[in-house]
Image: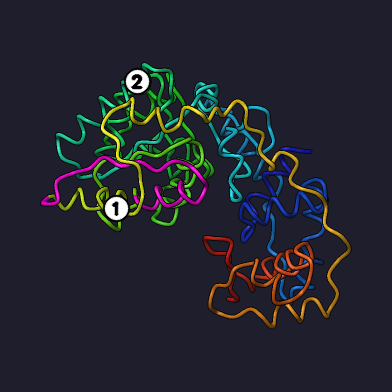
Amino acid sequence: MSDIDRLRLIRTPGIGPITWRQLIARFGDAARALEALPDLARRGGGKAPTPPDPRTIEREMKQVAGLGARYLFLGDPDYPPLLAELENAPPAIIVRGDGALARRPTIAIVGARNASAAACRFARELAHDLAREGAAVVSGLARGIDTAAHMGAGPATIAVIAGGIDVAYPPENAALQERIATEALLIAEMPPGTEPRARHFPHRNRIIAGIAAGTVVVEAAPKSGSLITARLAGEAGREVMAVPGSPLDPRAQGCNLLIREGAILVQNAADVLEQVRPIDPRSVRAPGVSFGSAPPADADDAARCAVSGLLGPVPVAVDELVRQSGLVPAVVQIVLLELELAGRLERHAGARVSLI
């Protein structure tokens, strides 16, 4: 499968990780999937998205190589095995540094940007102790807890950034980001030159949660991005852990809430490793490697009407569509794929969909 074709499909507007995986499963490779886009969108009642020109992708690939980075595609032997388990795993990531780190037992440490000095010290020492025990520590290179975790883990750290691999954010962490890329591992999903925007951070958070066997939250407000990462980790079947804090400190409310809702209370590296020791990412083989089996024949008009009639502006679970339509799951997925490529369907967390 051509890397240029794979990237053209990935960079096509409106094609997200789930759609990309379904297209590869259906057509076998990216070239045939690209050829099929107009027909699929027509069946869904809309106009097909326009893939980028191959020369645009070639320029991107040259830029990535010039930065000393490389692509890892879903299904590649070096692709992080636990990340590949996610339904919405990135079809491609761009990495600089030691890719072997992502195959170590990995712990995510996340928390507040405006963290207290005590919490930053705790995160730094926790990361150091985990690294000393052979684990890798992944975080998001933000201010506060993330920075402390990266510094504590030293060369055993993985930084996942929201923008391009060549964009330092926040600016004050530019030197740390370069050091991680040189001595440890830096990961980005966005193309080079992408400035991080608010919409990019949830995508970054899912990579942090997905690459790790467990996520530790150290100081976080109840509606913070750190709790989004914790929720994503829980949805992926990973361990969610939290460090308790004073009920008088607003920065500890998120952690205390997580513990009340069932997260594991941890106070040191031994507590963390006790929860994740049974998970060895080297033994994991994700279903995404084969992209599933090809679906049966195309959906007919009756199937399209049945599924479309069940959809509306309120998100509904795909499983519920299968149950109520009486159709086999593969046919329902074909109809949803056609609607999405036509620009009429939006996907939501928890395998839910709605009409636009």
In the image, what residue occupies the spot 30% across and 40% down? 265
Q: Quadrant of the N terminus?
A: top right
Report x, y in % for residue 38. 78, 65
Magenta segment includes 199? no
Q: Foreground: 342 or 310?
A: 310
Q: Foreground: 141 or 230?
A: 230
Which residue type does callout 1 highlight? Arg
- Give the distance between the C-alpha atoms of the residues marked 2 and 1, in whole angstroms: 32 Å
- For mark 1, what is the residue? 260
Mark 2: secondary structure = helix
In the image, what residue occupies the spot 56% across and 36% down? 82
| First reached walking from the N terminus: tag 2 or tag 1 | 2
Please give left or right for residue 153 compared with residue 61 in the image: left
- For mark 2, what is the residue? 154
Task: Count the numbered circles shown.
Answer: 2
Which segment did they paint magenta? 227-248
Q: Foreground: 183 or 252?
A: 252
Which residue type does callout 2 highlight? Gly
**Picture quarter containing residue 322?**
bottom right
Please identify the residue farthest to the left as the structure is shown: 248
